[in-house]
Image (cartoon, rainbow, N blue to C red):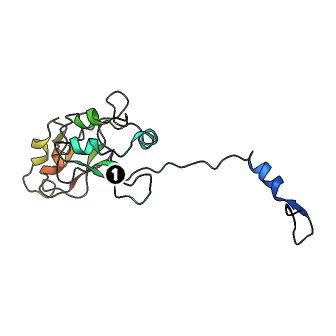
Amino acid sequence: MSDIQRTDDEQLISSARRAFFRRFAPEPEQVVPNSRYPRPPWAVDNTLFLALCTQCDQCIDQCPMRVLGRSDEKEEILSGRPVLDLSYGSCDFCGQCVDACPAGALSREKGKKRQTIPQLSGSCQAELGLYCNLCEEACPEQAISFGADKKPAIDLSLCSGCGECAMDCYSRVLVMAKA
């Protein structure tokens, strides 16, 4: 009789019966969080990446450009996962990170090479009337050009997301954002 309880309005409620019906209730949908940081080149989509990545750090260890690091995000599932940080370097897409990944979280066939895109976060030197085309000269893909308005135009169909342009931006207004 410990299974039956009385409530304030004297209805009988069975906890075993509640548990029985709870089994058939739809599960609350699990929301997979997105990282605020870009993934390494050739990372598969987020859900699959989080399922496959074992946090072995082999991709980070093999990166000759040292642009891969560990996420510092608070969510447990995101914390410590490899991320691409182009703040102090650029990626030459050598592929050593992909070759080192034993789990398939990085894949040339299933993953996406470009994880970042350049964006202007303010007015650059050229827009302010000073001569500057460092980002245009630095771009190995020739994806940046200057128009009549002296504002850099970025052709994303040509851009690889390597980060060279942001590294050479004198005023640091060209930044690499998550694609």
Where is residue 38? Give x, y as percent.
32, 47
Q: Is residue 27 left or right of residue 14?
A: left
Q: Kindly indicate the quadrant of the structure image that contains residue 41.
A: top left
Q: Name the residue beneath numbered marker 1.
A: 37
The residue carrying pointer 1 sits among few (fewer than 14), some (14 to 19) or many (20 or more) residues within 10 Å by Cα, namely many
**Residue plotted at (37% across, 37% down):** 105
Q: Is residue 119 left or right of residue 90?
A: right
Along the line of sight, the residue nearer the viewer: 146 or 51: 51
- Residue extending farthest to the top is 109
Q: Amino acid at mark 1?
A: Tyr
Q: Kindly indicate the quadrant of the structure image that contains residue 139.
A: top left
Q: Is residue 143 above or below residue 89?
A: above
Along the line of sight, the residue nearer the viewer: 128 or 52: 52
Where is residue 11? Give x, y as percent.
91, 64
**Residue plotted at (44% across, 57% down):** 75
Mark 1 secondary-structure assignment: loop
- Residue extending farthest to the bottom is 8
Q: Kindly indicate the quadrant of the structure image that contains residue 46.
A: top left
Q: Is residue 12 left or right of residue 135?
A: right
- Residue extending farthest to the right is 10
Quarter of the image containing the N terminus?
bottom right
Along the line of sight, the residue nearer the viewer: 148 or 97: 97
Q: Is residue 45 above or below residue 127?
A: above
Quarter of the image containing the C terminus?
top left
Q: Is residue 157 visible?
A: no
**Residue plotted at (16% across, 46% down):** 165
Along the line of sight, the residue nearer the viewer: 118 or 68: 68
Where is residue 135? Give x, y as percent.
13, 46
